[in-house]
């Protein structure tokens, strides 16, 4: 396993029968597995063994899946390359020497490398769709509230959903059928997925489908990526879909708004790791403050520290209105723009990532550059909508993903459209 895909590769056998009997699944290491280490890619949780299963893990076991390992990820989900993992970077099986994307890079790489048939990741601002695009596999970010987050270690809870990966749209849809639905343990879930039948939606029939192309999501994107995107759109057109340009003026503020909200929520969520209640304990012997500071200094990596500091600042008295509240206003505007665009289109299409996969190590010293690479994915989380990334082709031998976004709880439309391509 030269690619460094798994943090833990203990097998967990599910039930004998069920829709996923005989299928292997890799699970991102921020999803709790009873009795099996769940590290979030962090030194802070290096030895943490949850006493319970996440709801999605119980559902997988009941469906007969075999869990083959806990997959590598950016520390606490904070990143776009899987290079912020305490356990080292994952190589991209579809483009060796390049990053697999992030933060669910190990999950996407497991499917791309054939180490697992299917995988689960989590998507706060693109962490399922980005690695799906970079590794040439399919990834779905469900509507907020479709899939239970019980047992998902929180990063930005108002934004994130657990989502499936597969080699084909049909595979990813089959896994979504198993995990979708309401859960008494997560009050933000809805009943829409309770009787889902996403797998039957993978018909590839796009006759009459109206596709909106938001011009803002093509601006500034790599030329080769844009070319590949138009080729894939051409394929959908050949099969009977039509497209027209639409505008989402608010998305120019989406990256800023996303990072203010995500970092603010992260600063609060990660306060529990103090080395006493949870997480790495230092051997400092001073007073409580010193012990607490040392545990966090040793346990967290640089990117996580940067976000806790910025998030704490954005929430602090005097700055709350200037940053957090403003970001929430921008979020409402983004939602409104998507609703409008989707009133005249069945789905919206764009490149998933504006760039092809970076070389390993290339982007490490430039966090701002990395944040900007999330330009096409974060607006969808701000709007709580579902999206899919499906392989569109390659540029210079590197995978390119096509993103389709749909109305809330209309995952079936995305699955139907995307299955015309993979
Ligand atoms: N790249 C984004 C971030 O770093 C998205 C991460 C995610 O979806 N977990 O926050």
Image: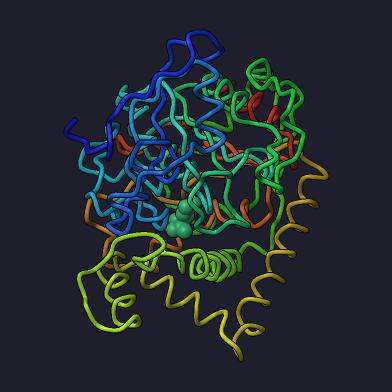
Quadrant containing the N terminus in the rendered view: top left
Residue at (34%, 49%) from the top-left corner?
48
For residue 257, which quarter of the picture? bottom right
The percent coordinates of residue 300 (x first, y second) are 31, 65
> In the image, is residue 132 above or below residue 357?
above
Residue at (54%, 51%) from the top-left corner?
377
Would you say residue 104 is visible in this rendering? yes
> In the image, is residue 311 above or below residue 407?
below
The percent coordinates of residue 220 (x first, y second) are 48, 59
Q: Going by the image, does 302 lie left or right of 245?
A: left
Q: Going by the image, does 313 lie left or right of 398?
A: right
Residue furthest left in the image: 2
Nearer the observer, 167 or 253: 167
> In the image, is residue 178 above or below residue 305?
above
- Colouring mode (rainbow / by chain / secondary structure / one colour): rainbow
For residue 249, which quarter of the picture? bottom right
The percent coordinates of residue 286 (x first, y second) are 25, 83
Residue furthest right in the image: 343
The percent coordinates of residue 385 (x first, y second) are 68, 46
């Amino acid at each position: 396993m030269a690619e460094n895909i798994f943090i833990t590769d203990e097998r967990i056998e599910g039930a004998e029968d069920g829709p996923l009997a005989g299928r292997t699944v890799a699970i991102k290491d921020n999803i709790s597995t009873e009795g099996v280490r769940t590290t979030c890619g962090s030194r802070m949780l290096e030895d943490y063994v949850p006493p319970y299963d996440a709801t999605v893990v119980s559902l997988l076991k009941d469906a007969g899946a075999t869990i083959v390992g806990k997959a590598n990820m950016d520390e606490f989900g904070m990143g776009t390359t899987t290079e912020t993992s305490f356990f080292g970077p994952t190589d991209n099986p579809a483009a060796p020497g390049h990053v697999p994307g992030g933060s669910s890079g190990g999950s996407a790489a497991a499917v791309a490398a054939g180490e697992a048939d299917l995988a689960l990741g989590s998507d706060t601002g693109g962490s399922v769709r980005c690695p799906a695009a970079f590794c040439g596999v399919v990834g779905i970010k469900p509507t907020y509230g479709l899939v239970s987050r019980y047992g998902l270690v929180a990063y930005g809870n108002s934004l994130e959903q657990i989502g499936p990966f597969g080699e084909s749209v049909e595979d990813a849809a089959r896994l979504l059928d198993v995990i979708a639905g309401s859960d008494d343990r997560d009050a933000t879930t809805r009943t829409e997925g309770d009787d889902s039948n996403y797998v039957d939606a993978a018909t590839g029939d796009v006759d009459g489908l109206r596709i909106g192309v938001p011009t803002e999501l093509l601006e500034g994107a790599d030329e080769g990526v844009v070319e590949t995107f138009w080729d894939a759109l051409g394929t959908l057109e050949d099969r009977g879909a039509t497209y027209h340009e639409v505008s989402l003026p608010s998305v120019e503020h989406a990256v800023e708004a996303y990072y203010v909200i995500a970092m603010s929520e992260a600063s609060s969520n990660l306060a529990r790791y103090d080395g006493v209640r949870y997480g790495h304990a230092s051997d400092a012997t001073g007073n409580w403050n010193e012990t607490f500071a040392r545990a966090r200094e040793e346990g967290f990596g640089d990117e996580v520290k940067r976000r806790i500091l910025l998030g704490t600042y954005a929430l602090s008295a005097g700055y709350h209105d200037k940053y957090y509240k403003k970001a929430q206003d921008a979020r409402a505007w983004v939602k409104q723009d998507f609703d409008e665009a989707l009133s005249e289109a069945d789905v919206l299409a764009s490149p998933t990532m504006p760039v092809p996969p970076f070389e390993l190590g290339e982007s490490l010293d430039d966090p701002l550059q990395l944040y900007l690479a999330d330009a096409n994915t974060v607006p969808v989380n701000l709007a709580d909508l579902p999206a899919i990334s499906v392989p569109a082709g390659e540029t210079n031998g590197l995978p390119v993903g096509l993103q389709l976004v749909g109305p809330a709880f209309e995952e079936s439309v995305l699955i139907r459209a995307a299955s015309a391509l993979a």
